[in-house]
Image (cartoon, helix red, strand yellow):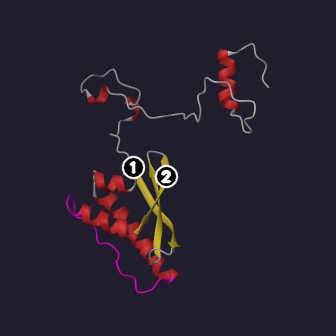
Amino acid sequence: MHPVRLSIPSFRSENNSIEKGYTVFRIDVLMNGRQHAVEKRYSEFHTLHKMLKKSIKPPEMPSKHVRNWVPKVLEQRRHGLELYLQSIIMENGVLPKVFLDFLNIRHFPSVPKTESCGSFDTESEESSKLSHQPVLLFLRDPYLLPSAHDAFSNVVIEGVVHGVFYPDLQPR
């Protein structure tokens, strides 16, 4: 089973005064337990298809021209685009960089879980490298005490800062 799974669960129409209306498709991407969504227009799928032709033989794409904008017809296009992307994943062991970029996936070499924290086995240099990924994100410097006027204080940060640096202070 490939580490990338995706679906196109929905679409929406966009209308503005500058250009005629168009449809945006929401792509839900699941890779290595992380999920995110990207939104793409059909023209972006078409551009991807042209770029993929340079490196692989991509599957057929749904028709570029839709005769009408009836929801049933757009639903068929959504389903066709979903099958198109899923076919690329199924037919290619290594996904092209242009495909990963289209889905906003940063490609990390897959490291078996037993080696995810490093390995004492030094048979290859690649197996001894650590794969670092962010675990926690601070919206502000966690070493500063939160301001008194902060409406939604971060309880976790306050607890850690107080517990580590100010163990004698009483919580507010």
Write the residue at 29% across / 51% down. 97
What residue is at 45 percent from the left and 86 percent from the top? 68
Residue 154 placement: quadrant: top right
How far apart are the alpha carbons under marks 2 and 1? Answer: 9 Å
* Along the viewing direction, whichever of 90 and 85 lies nearer the viewer: 85
Q: Is residue 95 visible?
A: no
Counting other residues with Cα less than 10 Å from the Cα at mark 2, is it few (<14), some (14-19), or many (20 or more)?
few
Quadrant (top left, top right, bottom left, bottom right) of the C terminus: top right
User: Which range of residues does the magenta coloring cover?
Assistant: 53-70
Instruction: Name the residue at 32% across, 27% down.
Output: 129
Relative image position of residue 62 (x, y in whole percent): 35, 75
- Provide the residue designation for mark 1: 105
Percent position of residue 51, x then y: 25, 62
Residue 139: give x, y in percent of width and height: 58, 36
Inspect the magenta stretch and tell me whether residue 26 lies in it.
no
Label 1: which secondary element: loop
For label 1, count other residues whose C-alpha is less than 10 Å away and answer few (under 14), some (14-19) or many (20+).
some
Query: Would residue 155 be seen by someone viewing this image from the given angle?
Result: yes
Residue 12 % position (x, y): 52, 71
Hey, what amino acid is under mark 2? His
Q: Quadrant of residue 124?
A: top left
